[in-house]
Image (spheres, grey):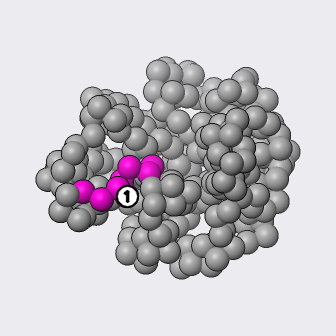
Amino acid sequence: MTNLSFQLYSARNYPPLSDVLKLLAAAGYKEVEGIGGMYADLDDAGLAALRAELDSNGLAMPTGHFALDFLEKEPARAVKIAKVLGMESVYCPYILPEHRPTDAKGWYAFGQRLQKAGAPIRDAGLDFGWHNHDFEFFALEDGSTPQDQIFAGGPDLSWEADIAWVIRGGADPFAWIEKLGSRITAVHLKDIAPKGENADEDGWADVGHGVVPWAKLMAVLKNTPARHFVVEHDNPNDLKRLVTRSIASANSY
């Protein structure tokens, strides 16, 4: 598969990063997705060093996650980081439970907040969007979902679709791809283990080794604007196994 990436959050428990990048390059990955903790606190020299290490391994970082408070407080720095590392798309990945709205109005306002936070990113010529988890698909009192409200409040937001989290949220991924497919600019390839399995990995599985119907999903997702497909596993107990098995599966779709 072209544009197959790897979310470096998946390797957070397997330092050092230099070894992770070598492993990914050797396995055939051409892209990685960054996380804020990797680069938010780096000075210019540190950023340049990270870019050089990516380049030396033949890896690009076209997408990256940034915390919302960082985007709001330091938008110029966020743009510089994205530009230095070669990003095309910036995604806000999460909101803590204690900060989540509880009704449709609140989630619509959150979408407006994301829309505003993304303005400097878009003004710099980059794509900006939201990355989902499961809570966006839990029904609100009015029958809508946070996902509905976020994207209504943020009309210019792209969607990095984490399909496995859509499923864990009790939603139909095919219906959501049909509904918001025009907004999808990246996809997380993650799998869910059969019920009762992989408890030590929080019930996740390597791509192609779980119950998510990836072959059927990819046939649909390829008709969206998605440019990057990002392998992820939230808590792998064997990084090399995850890296090698997932790319083999992904390349078969």
Please, what is the three-letter code of the amino acid marked with disc 1?
Answer: Phe
Q: Quadrant of the C terminus?
A: bottom right
Instruction: Estimate the x, y position of residue 102 in percent, counting from the top left.
Output: 21, 45
- Viewer-nearest residue: 25 or 154: 154
Q: Residue at x 48, y 32 (%)?
A: 36
Can residue 71 be seen here?
no
Q: Residue 22 location, x and y as percent?
A: 80, 36
Chief secondary structure of the magenta portion? loop
Q: Which residue position holds label 1?
A: 137
Q: In the displayed structure, would residue 19 be above or below residue 83?
A: above
User: What residue is rendered at 63% in x and 40% in y?
Assistant: 202
Drawn side of residue 21 relative to residue 175, left or right: right
Where is residue 100 shown, x and y percent of the image? 27, 40
Left or right: 223 in relation to 212: left
**Residue 35 belongs to the span the image colors magenta:** no
Q: Is residue 95 left or right of residue 42?
A: left
Q: Quadrant of the N terminus?
A: bottom right
Q: Seen from this angle, which residue lies furthest front? A: 196
Name the residue located 46 percent from the left edge and 27 percent from the top edge: 40
Identify the residue at image location x=66%, y=68%. 214
Instruction: Give residue 191's position: percent from left, percent from top.
Output: 65, 55
Q: Compare residues 81 and 180 and report the one nearer the observer.
A: 180
Q: Which stretch did the figure color magenta?
A: 133-140
